[in-house]
Image (cartoon, rainbow, N blue to C red):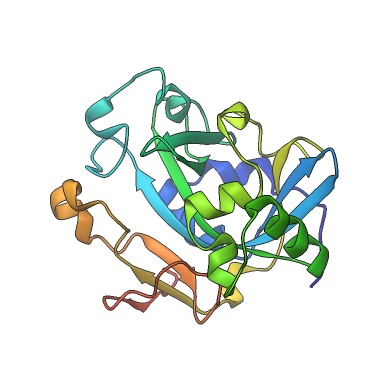
Amino acid sequence: MNINNQPLPRTFYEYPALEAAPRLLGQHLIRRTEAGDIACRIVETESYGGIEDKGSHAYGGRRTARTEIMFNSGGAAYVYLIYGMHYCLNVVTAEQDNPQAVLIRAVEPLTLHDAECMAANRKLKIKKPSDLSGGPGKLCRALRIDKSLNGSPLSAPGGALWLAQGEDPLGLNIIQSPRINIQYAEEYAYKLWRFYIKDNPYVSIKDKVEQVFTWT
């Protein structure tokens, strides 16, 4: 697979989360470590958009030390811990004071070397691709992403964590479905705001409620 070191344009991060989420599919996530770079392709995302979204940490304009980064203009990583054990990586998008973020749910290593590095970081036997990086906690362990990377500028190539241009998402077969494990979000739990590349083996969960995504 072709690896491109051209960063996503700064204007990409101006999209609201619901527009950025499908556009992030096929793009490359690069993690720089002391042992070298690990490159992967984003294959699954979820949109968390604005103060009206009951699934969002910033619902109702909730502004805390943890969510403050979501109120900044887009372009930074939002990393947080859930259940006291799993880190989650999000891409902050949209303009200042409009809290929007896209959760990266699954990635696919670009090369065998990347896959081997990710498996070594997981420290377990990988039986199928989704075991490696299919799910936000799994991908963060595979890429050694933790709270120390919260706030990292994703548009800066050569940093600890950044986004590079990959495939044109308009050419991908994209499926949309409800987001995972947000029953507390009431009517927002049923929004089809999860996006993934059809039939990709690294996707975390295949949902019964799904439909083909079309660009508008």
Residue 34, quarter of the rendered image: top right
Residue 44 is situated, as x and y percent measured from the top left of the image, at 50, 63
Q: In the rendered view, does 150 fall on the left or right side of 50?
A: right
Tell me the residue at 66%/48% (across/down).
143
Residue 48 is situated, as x and y percent measured from the top left of the image, at 36, 46
Task: Work out which quarter of the rendered image holds the N terminus and state it.
Answer: bottom right
Residue 45 is situated, as x and y percent measured from the top left of the image, at 47, 58
Q: Nearer the viewer, residue 55 or 19?
A: 55
Residue 11, quarter of the rendered image: top right
Residue 162, quarter of the rendered image: top right
Task: Work out which quarter of the rendered image holds the C terminus and state it.
Answer: bottom left
Q: Nearer the viewer, residue 116 or 19?
A: 116
Q: Nearer the viewer, residue 133 or 120?
A: 120
* Residue 135 against residue 144 in the figure, above or below: below
* Residue 212 against residue 152 in the figure, above or below: below
Residue 23 is situated, as x and y percent measured from the top left of the image, at 54, 60
Q: Is residue 142 visible?
A: yes
Q: In the rendered view, does 120 fall on the left or right side of 173?
A: right
Q: Nearer the viewer, residue 117 or 43?
A: 117
Tell me the residue at 25%/51% (across/down).
182
Q: Is residue 18 visible?
A: no
The residue sitting at the top extreme is: 65
Q: How many marks?
A: 0
